[in-house]
Amino acid sequence: MQNRDKVLNALKNKNLVKIISGIQNYDKQKTLAVAMAAEMGGATALDICDDPEIIRSIRALVQLPLFVSSTDPLKLIAAQSYGVDVLEIGNYESFYKLGKMFTPKEILDIAQFVKKSITTDILLCCTIPATLELKNQIKLGKELLSLGFHMIQTEGFSPGTPVSDRKDTGYNDILKAASTLTNTLELRKALPNANIICASGISLTTAPLALAMGATGVGIGTYINSLTSQNEMTEKVKEIMSSVNSFTHNYLEELKSTKKMLVV
């Protein structure tokens, strides 16, 4: 199966897990470690920065479907020639800390330029900024799908988290992911047939929640790439894949049971 089909098939089956090394992570050795962990851990895909040298190195190293993320349309278009499988506009979280926000017009301008400039049968993805009101997220999502984008990605945004004495990991994971989970739920209601990847604050705890909210896949970055050991990263990827595949199996079984009941 070609990588393009692997991505689309995983989205169809609601079990796409994309490991994200970081849109502004230009550390080659760190990216290589994340890439190997993603491959050895059985992830569906890998998402890396737009640096040509890093892209070439990763493409030679792993067989996984490869996303390249950027907000620079020229770098996205150039990435086609390096064996990339998906071009992704975004995500934007790292830019917010620098005071940079992205408007729907800016994103659509990039999307239209990339769409008309691609020369290969490559998949297109775009992150919807969490800084937008939900109605504007939905509007942008519809416009991107009408342009021919194959998937959209959600993100979370929190201007500040209240101080809390709670230290349990599950609570903090869910708190961090609350924004992107909400965005995923609302986008799914408005766009019932869209491929939606839920990212930002997604972890072992929140990945199944994202799928339950209507995501067809998850993007996982900090939860993996903040670890210092490749072995640790690999084990975490394996745990997440097991969790997601378990959810997907149960989801498909329930779907079959529902269809049987309707036929009877």
Image (cartoon, rainbow, N blue to C red):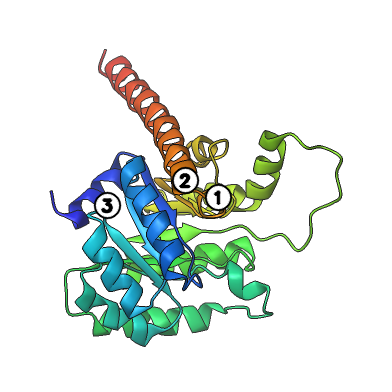
User: Which sits earlier in the primary sequence, circle 2 or circle 3?
Assistant: 3
**Which amino acid type corresponds to the residue marked 1 in the rendered image?**
Leu
**Which amino acid type corresponds to the residue marked 3 in the rendered image?**
Val
Q: For this rendering, which residue is in front, 181 or 171?
A: 171
User: Which sits earlier in the primary sequence, circle 3 or circle 1?
Assistant: 3
Q: Is mark 3 on a helix, strand or loop?
A: helix
Q: Mark 1 points at which residue?
A: 227
Answer left or right for 191 relative to 99. left
Q: For this rendering, which residue is in front, 224 or 111?
A: 224
Q: Quadrant of residue 252?
A: top left
Answer left or right for 182 relative to 160. left
Give the residue drawn at x 25%, y 68%. 84
Badge 3 vs badge 1, beta-carbon distance below 8 Å: no
User: Few, some or many C-alpha atoms within 10 Å of disc 2 (few <14, some 14-19, many ≥20)?
Assistant: many
Q: For this rendering, which residue is in front, 12 or 228?
A: 228
Residue 193 makes an appearance in the image: no
- Residue 114 image point, x, y percent: 32, 81
Quadrant, the C terminus: top left
Residue 90 vertical placement versus 202 (above, below): below
Q: Nearer the viewer, mark 2 or mark 3?
A: 2
Q: Name the residue under label 3.
A: 7
Q: What element carries label 2?
A: helix
User: Few, some or many C-alpha atoms within 10 Å of disc 3 (few <14, some 14-19, many ≥20)?
Assistant: many
Q: Name the residue under label 2.
A: 233
Residue 77 vertical placement versus 169 (above, below): below
Q: Residue furthest left?
A: 1
Q: Which of marks 3 and 1 is in front?
A: 1
In space, the residues marked 1 and 2 are separated at their CA atoms by: 6 Å
Badge 2 vs badge 3, beta-carbon distance below 8 Å: no
Answer left or right for 31 relative to 146. right
